[in-house]
Every structure is written in structure tokens, then in C-alpha cells.
Image (tube, rainbow, N blue to C red):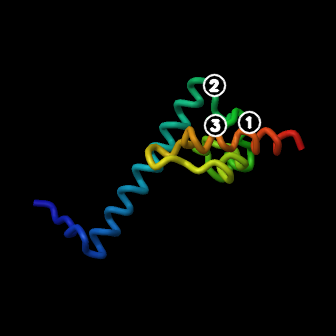
Amino acid sequence: MALEPAPGTPVGAAVEGLLARSAALLDGVEGAVRRVADGTYGTCEACGAPVGADRLDADPAAARSALTAATVPTSAAGGMPSLVASAASVGAVAYTSRR
């Protein structure tokens, strides 16, 4: 019989937080492996710009450029940019990239 912390307690909340963070990290690694396999690793999934070596050094699972990550909010499901936010920011991204 395994001991499990009761949900809603400080220990239970800490364990749930660790499990959620671990799942998010695993999702990021799996996404990076998928992008390596399909040849898109290092390219922003939202705007197609390079993610940047410094950003990938800091977070090898980064899927978005620094500009996109700063300007396009992510959707609640899956962490991908929402289509509405992406469409609204296209002008800003294009304008900024021409500078």
C-alpha cells in the first residue's frame, strides 16, 4: 500500500505541482524531438523566424522566437499561440522584423 498525500493539503498541492511541471517539461522535450525529426527545430512555430541560439541554450525546448513569445499570448490548451492573438499580432511581428 503506497502512501499518497491527501489532495488539498500543502504536501498534496506540492506533489500535484511537481507532477504538472514534470508533465509540461516532458511535453516540451517531446515537442523538441518532433521538431528535430521534421527539420523545424530552431524555427518559431508561430511566425517562422529563427528561435535564436541564446534562447535555445536557455531552453532547448523553446518553440517560439523571443518576439513571438513576448507579443503573442498562448492559448489555455497546449501552450500554442491562439489563432485570434496570432492574427492580431501579424502586423506587429512583420513591422518589427523589418526594422
Tell which circle, 2 or 3, labels the residue nearer the N-terminal end.
2
Callout 1 crowding tier (Cα within 10 Å): few <14, some 14–19, many ≥20: some
Distance CA(mark 2)–CA(mark 3):
15 Å
The answer to whether residue 70 is above or below residue 86 is below
Distance CA(mark 3)–CA(mark 1):
8 Å
**Type of amino acid under label 3:** Ala
Q: Which residue is mark 3?
A: 46
Q: Which residue is mark 2?
A: 39
Relative depth, front residue between 21 and 91: 91
Residue pushed farthest right?
Answer: 99
| Position of residue 39 measured from the top left corner of the image (x, y, whole percent) | 63, 25
Query: Is disc 3 placed on a helix, strand or loop?
Result: loop
Check contact, mark 3 vs mark 1: CB within 8 A: no
| 1 left or right, relative to 41 | left
Callout 3 crowding tier (Cα within 10 Å): few <14, some 14–19, many ≥20: some
Nearer the observer: mark 2 or 3; the answer is 3
Check contact, mark 2 vs mark 1: CB within 8 A: no
Query: Is disc 1 placed on a helix, strand or loop?
Result: loop
**Type of amino acid under label 1:** Ala
Nearer the observer: mark 3 or 1; the answer is 3
Relative depth, front residue between 51 and 74: 74
Q: Residue at x 62, y 50 (%)?
A: 59
Distance CA(mark 2)–CA(mark 1):
14 Å
Q: Which residue is mark 1?
A: 49
Q: Residue at x 25, y 74 (%)?
A: 9
**Type of amino acid under label 2:** Gly
| Position of residue 46 measured from the top left corner of the image (x, y, whole percent) | 63, 37
The answer to whether residue 68 is above or below residue 30 is below
